[in-house]
Structures are given as C-alpha cells and as structure tokens.
Amino acid sequence: MGNVIRVADNGLHHRWPIETLYKAALSETERHFRKKSERKMATGDAAANVVLRRKQSIVSSLCKHLSLDPKIFLDSIVENDIKSLCANILKSSGRAPKNSDEVSKWISFAESYPVDSKACFGALHVINEELAEKSVLVGDGLKPSEADVIVFSLLHPFVIGLPNTERQKLPHLVRWMEYIQSKENFGELFPKILLENDVIELPKPKIVVKVEADPNAKKTVQSTKNADNTEANPNSKKSDVKKVTGNNAAAEEKKKLPEKEAVEKDKEVSISLLNIQVGLIRKAWKHPSADSLLVEEIDVGDAKLRQVVSGLAKYCSPEELTNRRVVLITNVKPGKLRDVMSEGLVLCASNEDHTGVEPLLPPEGAKIGERVSFSGNEGKPEDVLNPKKKQLEKITPHLFTDDKGVATFKGIPFMTSVAHAHVLFPKQASNDHDMTQVPHST
C-alpha cells in the first residue's frame, strides 16, 4: 500500500493516499491561475476596447476635418496604431500640416495617453496648463489644427463625464474644448459638452488699456500689479504747512529741490505727450510673414492713409476691423514690424489674463482725426516720441477702463468733442485666448 496521510475532517480522521492529495492541490492551483488569467484577459480586453474606440474617434474626426472618407482607414484600425493611422490620413489628404513637428508631438501624446481613469485626469491638468496662454494647441491664430482635432477626439469622453466641480479646476481646457466643438463641424460624432455659465464666464477685474505693436519699445506689456504699484504720485502726499524762519530757510530750500524734480518727472509722463487721435480703418489684411499680426490702413484725416501693424490677429479678423473706428497713437517713431512699416499704435483693452482683447471704440459723432483730450492735462504733444526716454512705457501703466468701460488715464476719461472713448467686450468674449501677450513687441 502506498504512503498515506491522516487528514482531520469535522473531527473524523481520514486516510488519503498522497497521490490523491497532490492531484487535488494541483487542481486548486490551476483553478486559481485560470481565474487570475481570466481577470487579466478581461482587464486587457477593456483596455483594448478603450484604445479601439479612441482610434475610431480620431480617424472619424480627422477625416471629417480634412474632408476624407473615413471608411478605408476604419477598416485598418485594429492592425495600425494611432501614429500610423494619422500619418496615413494626413498623407492621403495631399497637404502637409503647418508646424508638422508640433502636430507630430501631439499625435505621440495621443498614442501614449493613459487608459486608467485616474492617470487620465492627471494628464488633463497637464493639458490645462499647456492651454493657459494658447487659443489652439498648434499655430498662432484661431484656426483649429489637425492636432487640435486629434486631441479633442481623445479627451472628449473624459471631459464630457466630468462633474462641474472638476471642470472648474480645468478652465483653460474646458474653454478650449468648447471653442473646438463650436469651430469644427463634427456632425454627430460627439455629443455637445454642455457648460455651466461660471466655467466660461470671463473674470471681471479692472480692464487694462493696452498699446498695440510698438516697434520701438522693448516692452509694452505691463501687468495690473505693476500698474497699481506705479500709480502712486510723488506729489500726492500732503505735508503740513510750517513757518520758515532764520536757519529753517536753507533746509526748506533743500526740500523744494526734490519737489521740483518730482514735477519734472511728472511732466515726463504726462498723457499730453501722446498724440491720440480718432481713426477709421479703411482696409485690413494679414501680415505676410507673421500669423499674430494684422496690417491696417487707417484714416486720421490726413491726405495719406496711415499704415499700422497690430498684434490683433488672434482676436479680430481683417473683415471685423475694416470700416471700424479706433483710437490710436500717431506720434510714435515709425518702424518696421517683420519687414512691414508701422506708423502708429492702436489702443486696445484686455482683461487681466488677456483672454479678451478689443480695440477702444470712439463715441458716435467723434470726427476722424480729432485729438483725444484729458481734463487737467492740457499740453502740446511731442512731434515724435523719443524711444530712448521710454515715455510710452511710463504712461501705459496708468491706462485703464473704469467699471463702465470708459478708457481713462489715472482715472481721467479719454474725451472727444462729443463723449468718452470706451471699450465694448462681447457678452461672451473669446477665450483663445490664452491666452498670449497682446501687444506684439520686437
């Protein structure tokens, strides 16, 4: 008789051959690993299904964007990865994408995008930061690129399922998703992402008046914080009046010297140095070598139209600017911006994060060419501002709009012969905005 082992079962003792126990143990081990393998296969199948659906969405949307029939590409999605599918589609379109290296980077991003939901949410925050100063993922303008379509298709199932509390943590991403779905005709490929008003509503801080495209200034963009810090006027501090007698006279005379210097310094930044005029844009077109710039011919009442280059391409189309009245500085030193001559600066207003930018609007009835004035700041403007004195840089930090949208210098309204100059932001201004510093500088 073979070896046996005594096994207790409910208080009874059984004698089982070792071979029988070994087979039982082996069967139990097999069942354990079979179940584990089945669970792994189920998880793998779920991940594979997610990837398959991503490929279908990307292929369908990219083909729609490029006006191609997706059927021939959908037939090969199983054996091809996202990179290969996108490469084949772009090749079939017959047109190479602009910024192809950037587009390739985002295709690689889509290829390596995680399947796990927690990892996906972490990746959304990375993209949110990427879009903080961008209107679109690739390109300097407002037109969605192939990369925007691919990444939108990738992220749509995650973003549409986010509760509003989570969306509020991703304001730039949500703004971009809403923009892409409004610009691209996806048909029935994707359900609309419905947004709460507080997700896309522009903040309501003090609006900063900006100067567009100064070719002679090294830096024309000033933050609101810097503006607030520089608003303090050295002449605004009140001092008690004291009698001056005998030995105090010399000391008092010394005190006057800094006061005189302060007065001279204040003159140096007087708004009266600027020749700010009402103009009418007769014609506008895209800059031939800079996507972020527009060129305008502006009528300021002179015999010749004034050509101005402005960094408004991200916010206004040439058609929107044509026949629009604006306010501009006309005594800046002419200079070239990307080989195109510019003879003025268009004044615009933006909110603090630069997601909304609009040219100032003169009041109805203001005459073309008339000079904007400021109460208590009368004076003759410089014939041409001296870039070395940085006069413009000292003045622009004090330009703001008030709570009614009226443009001001240190709280003093821009005045024309009929009324104030102001700015009108759309009820729901474009958020492309992220995005970028608006005046362009060289």
Image: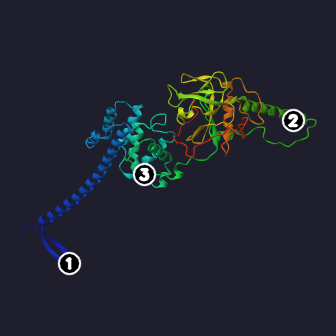
Amino acid type, callout 3: Ile
Q: Quadrant of the C terminus?
A: top right
- Disc 3: which residue: 160
Amino acid type, callout 2: Glu
Estimate the spatial distance between the alpha carbons at disc 2 and disc 3, rounded to whole Å: 71 Å
Give the side of residue 1 with respect to residue 138, left or right: left
Callout in the foreground (1, 2): 2
Seen from the viewer's position, the closer of residues 58 and 35 is 58
Give the side of residue 71 with respect to residue 350, left or right: left
User: In the image as oriented, which residue stretches furthest toward the front?
Assistant: 365
Residue drawn at 52 percent across, 42 percent down? 431
- Disc 2: which residue: 252
The x and y percentages for residue 40 are: 27, 54
Amino acid type, callout 1: Gly
- Tell me if I can see residue 410 in this picture: no
Asked which quadrant contains residue 84, the reply is: top left
How busy is the neighbourhood of tag 3: few (under 14 within 10 Å), some, or many (20 plus)?
some
Callout in the foreground (2, 3): 3
Asked which quadrant contains residue 137, the reply is: top left
